[in-house]
Structure formats: structure tokens, C-alpha cells
Image: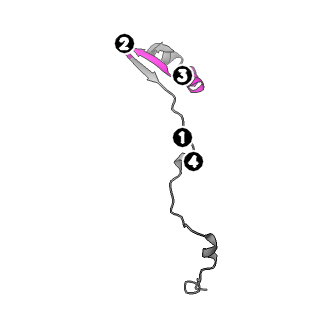
């Protein structure tokens, strides 16, 4: 869909909602230029997680460690 800048100004919220709902870009004509408004898909919450260091190996080995030297009551 192509609109002029005046048409965009009059119906900006309706047009932006339409871009979000349909996923189709909106072309805005300004003089000899054509601008496009495109909805970007939000990143998933899992994609935002950062990598952490972890202990590799058998978890049972941690249970049987001797912590007596580190323990202070």
C-alpha cells in the first residue's frame, strides 16, 4: 500500500496498526522519494539470554566434595 505524507499524517495510527497486523510494509511517497515502514519482529525472550559459565561433569561429584577446610561456623 502506498500513501502520501498527508495521508499518513491523517491516518498514522490506523496505518501503523495495519502494518503490524498484516506484516506488509507501508510505502510513503514524499516528492520523488519512496519510504517504507516495515514491522520488525520482536526477538524472543530466549534470544536475549546471555551465556553463563557452568560446571560440567557429574553433579554427584559436587555432593561428595570435602568442604571441611572451607567451612567456618
Q: Position of residue 67 (x, y in %)?
A: 58, 83
The residue identified by callout 4 is 46
The residue at which mark 3 appears reads as 24
- Is residue 27 a member of the stretch shown in magenta? yes
SS at mark 3?
loop
C-beta proximity under 8 Å, tags 3 and 1: no
Q: Residue at x 51, y 32 (%)?
A: 40
* In front of the other: 21 or 67: 67
Circle 4 or circle 2, nearest the eye: 4
Image height of 48 relative to 6, above or below: below
Q: Which mark is residue 31?
A: 2
* Residues shaded magenta: 12-33
Mark 4 vs 2, N-terminal side: 2
Q: Earlier in the sequence, mark 2 or mark 3?
A: 3
The quarter holding residue 71 reads bottom right
> Residue at point 48% right, 14% down?
2
Nearer-the-camera pick, 40 or 67? 67
- Scheme of image coloration: one colour
**Crowding near the residue tagged with mark 4, few <14, some 14–19, many ≥20 C-alpha atoms within 10 Å:** few
67 versus 57 height, above or below: below
The span from disc 4 to disc 2 (Cα, nearest Å) is 43 Å
Q: CA distance from mark 1 to mark 4?
A: 8 Å
Q: Mark 1 or mark 3, which is nearer the start of the sequence?
A: 3
Residue lying at the far front in this picture: please name it. 58
Callout 1 environment at 10 Å: few (<14), some (14 to 19), or many (20+)? few
Amino acid at each position: 500500500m502506498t500513501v502520501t505524507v498527508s495521508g499518513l499524517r491523517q491516518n498514522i495510527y490506523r496505518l501503523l496498526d495495519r502494518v503490524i497486523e498484516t506484516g506488509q510494509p507501508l510505502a510513503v511517497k514524499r516528492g520523488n522519494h519512496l519510504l517504507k515502514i516495515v514491522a520488525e519482529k520482536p526477538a524472543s525472550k530466549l534470544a536475549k539470554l546471555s551465556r553463563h559459565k557452568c560446571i560440567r561433569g557429574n553433579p554427584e561429584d559436587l555432593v561428595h566434595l570435602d568442604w571441611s577446610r572451607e567451612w567456618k561456623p
